Every structure is written in structure tokens, then in C-alpha cells.
Amino acid sequence: MALDRKIAYIDLSTGKIETRPIPIEVRKKFLGGRGLDAYLLYNHAPQGCDPLGPDNPLMISGGILTATCASATARTHIMAKSPLTGLLGSANMGGFFAPEMAWAGFHHLVIKGKAKSPVYIWIHNGRIEIRDAAYLWGKSTTETQWAIREELGDEDIKSAVIGQAGEKLVRYANVMTGIKNAAGRTGMGAVMGSKNLKAVAVRGTMDIRIAHPVDALEHNKHFIDGITGAKVNKTQGALGTPFIWGATNSWGGLRNRNFQYNQMEYADDIEPERLDEIATETIGPHHMTGCFGCQVHCRAQYKIPSGPYAGKYDEGPEYTSQGAFGAEPDCRKAETVLAGNHLVNQYGVDNLEIGSMIAWAMELFELGIITTKETDGLDLRFGNDEALLEMVHRICLRKGWLGDVLAEGGIPASEKIGKNSFDYLIQVKGMNNLHSDERGTPGLALNIATASRGSDHLRSRPAIDLYHLPEKVMRKIYSSPVPYDGPLSSEHTDYEGKPWQVFWHQNCYMAVDCLGICKYHTVFLGATLPNFEDWPKVIYYNTGLEFTPVELWEIAERCNNLERLFNLREGLTRNDLKKGDMLNHRYFDEPTRRGAPDVVGRTIDRQKFNKMVDEFYSHCGWDKKGVPTSETMQRLGLNQEPSHLL
Amino acid sequence: MSIKVSIHKTHRHLTGGLETVDVKGQTVGDCLKDLIERYPEMGKVLFKPGGKLHPLIEIYLNTKSTYPDELKKPVKAGDEIYITLMLAGG
């Protein structure tokens, strides 16, 4: 059954491999996926360890529902101490890897040490081997996956791999599977690279026994009806994640020219309809595809229609690539967005981070803080498409002074560049933000400031805050599974009630990441989609474990607090601009210049922001410094951590 | 009969700053038509050029989404229509 899937400890320094069952008591406290990975990180990472050193443990996992009869259980989670932030490293990807790993017998891997030369790990029906990967070093992410399939003679092998960015220890390198599925935040690819680990390849045909298969399938039919019956999924299935681009831009919610504007002008060529047209022209009308067990199919396939990369096949681009290679550097051509997306997928690097880094460098260049001396002659002005793509190559291969410096991540780069370059870096905890501008949305600003892995939209963003939902609908969502009768507002510009929403979503997304399901099949994307009330049944039918919605909520709280404890242990303090829950001064000091009347001229009010943080901490059971209180530790059973049960 | 339409904050500059507008009609479609007759700019954000409801717009009637066949859903006096904008994702 699903709960029979094991954990494997693999030491690349010694070659020792050990497998163990996962005790049911541990499952009941941390479920699986990200939550159990947080437990493993807190228990296995020595305090203050070098993120790129052999002591940093790398966890790769599926959720507790992975490869069961539940839909959308495609997600693979990866965790380690981050080489980008020095705090929590955590990333999540779709595709087919985690289900295959579960069929091969495993839900969790803990990889330690460092191989003497490049290797990959081969997992096949309960067996684990460490194999030579010297011939794979230097290959792109897709070349690597196909080479492993060819070597082992099985086209159904799924691999989680790094590209050249991971090999070169770019501190925001991805782990990838398939064409574009990217565990793309906090530099987990660099951790793999530091261990000389090129790939983890899996193939499995071991049955997974479902606890109550008839009920599981019957319930999943209702689940699918709910997913396919939601308008947001219909739209996303047609246009992919870019579907929100047009309205977000015309409203004024995008970050343009680093942080100078909150709206991009002349963006017609990168509108979702235009990207869809290109996919239709180059692939055909049925160009949308999906991950394991998915009914949404949000991923487009395309070929680049023109320019120096014409004819190259890829998948996406996601909304994030529209920002990274469109809005932030102010490049207006679809072919540039598509080419940038292709390059990051092949090199295996975080599109959000690299796009933000280059846009930041462009602003520094226009301000004269860096010059052609630092760029080795490159004219790094906004809107220079060729320079943008050239910088992607240079960063991923660490070519030239600036390429090497930017590969180190924003804070180390700002220290090397000097002057007042740090003031222009739009980061939290050392990680750059999505290309969104939260000055008009206090709830979203609180989310990026307090998210456990740095500035990020997938940890606690109350995304549906932007919908303008009826207040009764919001009250129904946010007063369950635990009661809440405090303020709530369906106005996205308000400050009141937002701390509760961020707290609620923080727990919601943790639960989702423990289950191993895709956020697009949850309330992240729409008010009618599943949340805490729906998941206990899915867990029970598939695994036999019984939880109430409140118990799931408590598990999510426990796991979030473990992540917080890890961050505190590694140096997080509340107001630290480099390692705290604090926004760049531009959020407070520079009013937005463009957009709809409800957005233009807005800043985040510092006093109200601090009050929101206080209130958020209070909901979390943390003191004013953001430290879990002894009562919270006791309530969540964390006062014995690290407990070394696994 | 009077139905109240709640306007998304990003659209209120198109309704002279009004948060809600009272409209008349037998269906959601009638009500939106009435709204657009008074505030023509709302037509551009609610509908695609071919006349279909914009894929990012979801209409709630009281506490329920009206999708699919949103425009055909019947309304009665005292109902509230919410124009919601699906801006989640990324």
C-alpha cells in the first residue's frame, strides 16, 4: 500500500545505502512530501552547515497520496539548506518522477555526502545503485534524461536531473524532470551539483495497494467533476498559466524594469493569446499537455517560430517566464520569451531568479553602478533582447565577471558590485520575487515577506484575494477547519483580515505539499476548488489513515513551525533585510506609477505592514520576534525536536 | 425588479467609482446588459469581441459561481451579482 513506500539513505561519500520503512507515527505527524522533508532536514542538517558541502542533506520525495487513485498527485518535492539564502531550501515540481519513484518502492530519499566523480542514482523496483555519470556531465537537462534511458534501455525511466547550471553551482540552479518541470526555487540543483550528483533515475512496476479502491475511485470521479467544472481550470487548460497576464498587466500588478514600473507597455506580442497562436501554428491545435493524473493540462508545447533559436522545441512558457524574459527586462518579443524559457529549461536554472537578477543588473547598468567594464562590453540596457539572452548563457556557464557574480545570487552579488546596488535588489531572505508588484495588495506583500523560503507566491499567497469574492464565500473558506470570526475583506487593497488569510493559506499549501498534489487542483486557484474539508476522505480511501480536517490543519501547522525553527536556527531575524521577514524599502518608499486607479500611487504603509506581521505571528503562535512560543511548541509536539526518529 | 451588481475594485473607474450598481433583468445576462448600457466601458472588460464572457471573468450569483452558462442563469429581486476576476496563478 501507499504507506509501505520506504525511505532510503544514500551516502555518496561512502557508497552506503540503507532503506527503512516510514513509521506510521511519523506519517501521522508529518504525512509525507514537504512536511516529512522538513522533519528530515531539521534532524539531519548540522546547524550552520555549508549548503554546498557534503553535510547538507538533500531530500527528494513524493507526497502521501503520490501514485494512488487520487488525481493530480504528480508533485516531487526537494529540500535541503539553500545555497541561495542560507535558510530553508525547498522546491516542488510536476511531471511523472514522484509517481515512478513510488512505484519503484520509495517515497523519500535522503542523500548525503559527495561523490568523488560525477554519478547518478538508479532506483528500480526496490533496488538502488550509484552509477558513473562522467559521460553525462556537461549535458543539458533533456539530453541527460534521454542518455540515461538509452544506457539502461528503457524509455519509461523518469529522471530528476541537473543541467550545466547545477554543475557550475549557480546558486539558483533547478532540479528538473521532463522538458520543463522544474523544482526551481532556492537552488536545489546547485546542491545536487555540489554532491557530483547529475541525476536520480527511477523506474518502478511495484503495485501500490489502495486501502478502499472502490471508494477511492468513486470519490475521485467527483473530484474530477469539480476540477473540470471550474471555469478557472477551463481557462487555464486553454491558455496555461499565462492566462492571467493580460488582466494583471492592465490592472498594474506586474513588475516592469526591475521595480520602476508596475505595468509593461507595448506587451501585445507576449499576451497569452499570441503565445497560444504560436503554439497552434508550430505544434497544432492540441498543444496543451499535463502531468501525471492531471485533468487541467496547463502546459503548452511550442517551437520557437523565428530568431536565432528558431525551430527549438519546448514547453511552457509559464506566466513566470513572461515576467522573467518580458516584463522585468522590458523585452517585448514573443520569440525572446520563448527562447529565454528554452534556455533556462536546458541549463536547469530558476527562471524567476535569473530574470530578476538580469533586470536588477539592467537597472544598475542604466544607473551607472555597473558599466561596460563589468559587462565585458555588453550593452545591458532594458529592452535589449540579445543582451538578456546572452546574460542567461553567461550566468549559467559562469562566463565573464558579471556572469560569475550574478550566479552567486543577489545578496553576494550586491556585496561584490558594491555602491548602493543592494537598494535595488527586490528580494526577501536572499531570494528574488516573482515578477509581481505587491504595492497595491497588502495581503500579497505580507505573503512574500513571511514565506518560509524567501520571496515567493506558492507558500502562503492568498491568491483568491484578488477575485473580489462575495464576503460570505470568503467567510465560509476562511472560517474552516478552525473557527475564525475576525475581520475579512474582499477588497485586495485592504490591510484588515489579511494576516489571517496568509496564515490560512500557509497551512493550506503546506497540507497540499504534504499530500503531493498540484496547487492548481486546490483553493489556490479558485474558491470552488478543494481544500481541508475534501482531503481527509481522499487520504482515508487511498491509505486507510483517518484524519479530521482540523487534524490536517494541525499537521500543516506543525510542519510550518518546523520550517520556521530551521530558519531561526540558521539565522533568521524579523527585520533583517537579508535574512528576515522584511521587504525592500522600495515597497514602502516608491509609489507605483502606472495601472488602474486603485493601484496607481500606492506604497505599502510601513506601520500597517508591521502591524500585519505582528498579527500574522500571533496567528502562527509566534512571539513578536517571530519565534514559536513554548506553548506552540508544546501544542504541536515539537518540544522534543530534533527527535531523530528517521 | 432590482438586482445589485458588485463591481470589482479594478473596474470601478469604469462605473464612476461606484462599488455596486442596481440593475434590472430576468437573467444574469440581462443584468450585465443593463449594466453595460449605463456604463459602456464595462462591456470591454466583461466580454470578448465576439460577445462571449471574458475567460477571466467569473460571475457569482449570491454565493454560487454561475459557471457554466452564466448568462442564462435566472435572477430574482434582491439577488446580488458579483463580478469576480480570476487573477490567481503563476
Image (cartoon, rainbow, N blue to C red):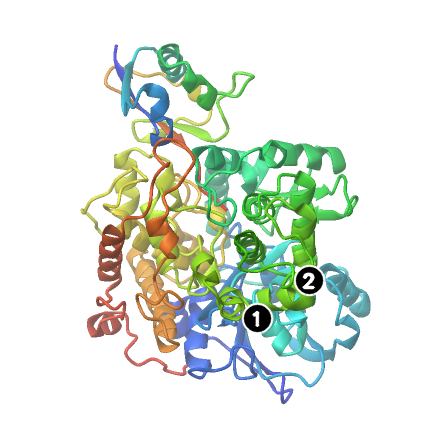
Tell me the residue at 74%/43% (across/down).
A303
Say which quarter of the image contains residue A449: bottom left
Query: Which residue is label 1 attached to?
Result: A106
Q: Nearer the viewer, residue A70 or A235?
A: A235
Q: Earlier in the sequence, mark 1 or mark 2?
A: 1
Residue A460 seen anywhere in this rendered image of the structure? no
Element type at mark 2: loop
Say which quarter of the image contains residue A551: bottom left
Determine whether A120 is above or below B55 in the image.
below
Say which quarter of the image contains residue A570: bottom left
**Chain designation of label 2:** A
In the rendered structure, which amino acid carries the disc numbered 2?
A: Asp
Q: Position of residue A445 (x, y in %)?
A: 36, 51
How many residues crowd around disc 1 within 10 Å: few (fewer than 14), some, or many (20 or more)? many
How many residues crowd around disc 2 within 10 Å: few (fewer than 14), some, or many (20 or more)? few
> What numbered label is drawn on residue A179?
none
For residue B18, side relative to residue A262 (left or right) = left
Q: Position of residue A272 (x, y in %)?
A: 59, 35
Q: Are marks 1 and 2 on the same chain?
A: yes
Determine whether A38 is above or below A389 in the image.
below
Query: Which residue is label 2 attached to?
Result: A376
In the rendered structure, which amino acid carries the disc numbered 1?
A: Phe
Q: CA distance from mark 1 to mark 2?
A: 48 Å
Q: Nearer the viewer, residue A430 or A52?
A: A430
Q: Position of residue A420 (x, y in %)?
A: 45, 62
> The C terminus of chain A appears in which quarter of the rendering?
bottom left
Element type at mark 1: strand
